[in-house]
Amino acid sequence: MTLIRTIVTSALLATLLATGCKSAKPAPEAPAAAPQPVYFHVDPATAATITGTVTYTGPHPAPTLIDMSEDPACVAAHKTKAYDESLLVAPNKGLANAFVYIEKGLEAKTFETPQTPVVIDQSGCWFHPRVLGIQTNQTLQIVNSDPVTHNIHPMASTNREWNHSQGPGDPPFNRRFPKPEVMIPVKCNIHGWMHAYIGVLDHPYFAVTDAKGAFTLPNLPPGNYTLTTWHEKLGVLSQSITVSPSARQVIDVAYKGK
């Protein structure tokens, strides 16, 4: 009996030891949190500003009348005659709706996404604005102010292409573009004369020229850059620039036509 008790006791002790070893096994470590991005912030003491005017000196045809008669509600909503706006040149030869941006020179910097949305409105059966810029992952808010249904269709190639119908009175909806892409053409699948263009960049250094062709790029860190100008009819012009600390530089861009 003593031998049996010894065997049983030894077996129980071995079981307890084995169980104890298993229970003492450390729990697996939680996966490490993803590192937070380090955003670049411009030093106000050295920040520079670029201003300029984009001009066009070549020939341009007389404005073309847009026929909206297929949708009388659009005729009423537009209120005045609609003319093609693909080439708008002011008396000073300033070119409207040119997209000016830093194409190269900021690759080592990461910029925070703005929280304020960029709005594109469908009003008078027209996109407003016709040309716009937005940062990657910034909210694009789409509004329909018209009494008719529209279908906004950004024909992206680097980002995902999508289209969305929006009826009169429908609430605004939001979309984002995660990748840089210059430029994304936009159309309305219902009204073929409606066009817009979206420039998506991973930094804030872009601008659209106003009615007189003027643009401003503020708070630019000093450095060497490629400044690029895009226009839907006239194409792309690029130039190398050097921006000095705290500079206030004027850089004009001229399209000479063909």
Image (tube, grey):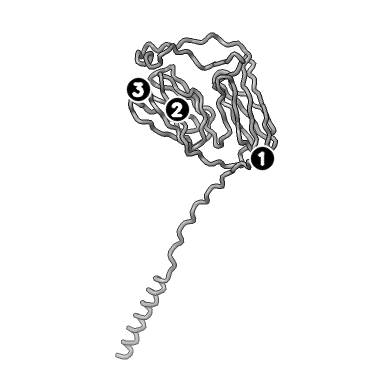
Height in image: 251 above or below 69? below
Q: Are marks 1 and 2 in contact (CB under 8 Å)?
A: no
User: Could you tell which of marks 1 and 3 lies nearer the N-terminus?
Assistant: 1
For the C terminus, give its image quadrant: top right
Q: Are marks 1 and 3 in contact (CB under 8 Å)?
A: no
Mark drawn on residue 46? 1
- Quarter of image, res 111: top right
Viewer-side residue, 20 vs 3:
20
Q: Amino acid at mark 2?
A: Ile
Mark drawn on residue 120? 2
Mark 3 — residue? 149
Residue 233: x %, y % from top left: 55, 18
Viewer-side residue, 215 vs 187:
215
Mark drawn on residue 193? none
Residue at 59% across / 30% down in the picture? 101
User: Could you tell which of marks 1 and 2 lies nearer the N-terminus?
Assistant: 1
